[in-house]
Amino acid sequence: MLVPGLGHYEINMVKALFKLLWDVGLSRLAKMLGFCSPKAQLSCQNATDHHKSWQIIQIFLFSFSFELLQQYVDYARIQQEFPTADGYFQWIPHRPEMHRFLSDAVFGYCLALHVFRAGIRRNNSDAINVAKARFAPLFFGLSMPFYMETFFRDSVLRTKCPPELLNFLKKHESYSVSGNDCKGEGGDFVLESFNRNVKRLLPSGLPNEQGWIRACRNVERLAKVNEYMVNILGISDSTDPEYSYMYGIKNEILQFRSIIKESKMVDSDSTEGLCGEKLAAEFCNFHEVCMKNFKDYAEEVSKTHSLQKRLKPKPIIISKKQQIISENYLSFTKEELKTKIEEHSMGDTKKKEWQKIKKGKKEGIINFLKDLQKE
């Protein structure tokens, strides 16, 4: 029986949101936070640091949710109505396209990620699986075949497994190594943490078999020695179950809200992102496209009774820039793109930048080619 690692599932949920929302507002938020150079922007866009990416999504979620709800509360006050969740969702269909798009993205996908993390922390099976089901269509909309398949396999497993096994899965969605009920982690992250502790005990250089055996046999004993020494010396240990550190993002939320207000993005008919990026014509229907891809995939699986063939639907195009890139270069292989780039004459700075980008994703290579063509 295979169960997806919730830690890596969360990482890819964050990456999916960065793909969806980069040209909409995350690019501007990244600049506000200091990711200003092209290299820093690309690193942020690829969500290479999960902890920073998580905090960026949290700033985006709370900033836009406050602004979206403020519009509804003002409307309810004028109408002399009491604001409610039902009232908000009845009011949304009458709003401009951008407002409807942001409402779907923020209260659908961003909030689902937030609930998913909360469920993992507290080993709450219902919260985890509701969040997975709400977020899953985005994997299909962005054509992420590995996680499309992972979601389906896990759903089928939970539907068909015996009640005893399902109860076991529900009780053990996540694990708390410290014993704190609010610090659960996915099993994959627990294993990674254990492996990290083992690697710390290995001598520098290439480890041999004897070194691995010695480290693995003594890791728990040495952890007790470390705990003993920490108590004697009175040092604050970050592994203490009562110890926690969370960087406050209140100021960043307020700063980003002022940028949103200034842009008038929420209450206008504009189809531009916060950085002035033109959005594609079909951007407002992205949720419908996600659901269509999801249903098409489910129908194909029900016909073939197999998940072996990874279907790859056409991904959503959010911005005009993505549309141009898609039309011009999406059919090219990475090798063809590299050949095309190396036909251009590049200065020393560009050559150094290219050496790093050529090892990365296709999207980064395409963006680099577009920049070369503009020069």
Image (spheres, grey):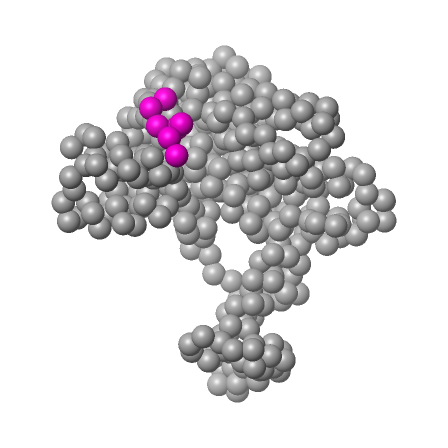
The answer to whether residue 262 is left or right of residue 247 is left
* Residue at left offset 20%, top offset 30%: 373
Q: Position of residue 306 (x, y in %)?
A: 71, 33
Q: Look at the picture and state if 164 lies above or below 298.
A: below
Report the quarter where the C terminus lies.
Answer: top left
The answer to whether residue 346 is left or right of residue 317 is left
Number of labels in the image equals: 0
Q: Which residues are magenta?
A: 327-333
Q: Is residue 71 magenta?
A: no
Q: Position of residue 335 (x, y in %)?
A: 35, 39
Q: Position of residue 22 (x, y in %)?
A: 38, 34
Out of 57 and 152, give the one closest to the viewer.
152
The answer to whether residue 239 is left or right of residue 175 is left
The answer to whether residue 166 is left or right of residue 91 is right
Q: Position of residue 63 (x, y in %)?
A: 42, 36
* Residue at left offset 35%, top offset 28%: 329
Q: Is residue 331 magenta?
A: yes
* Residue at left offset 53%, top offset 41%: 13
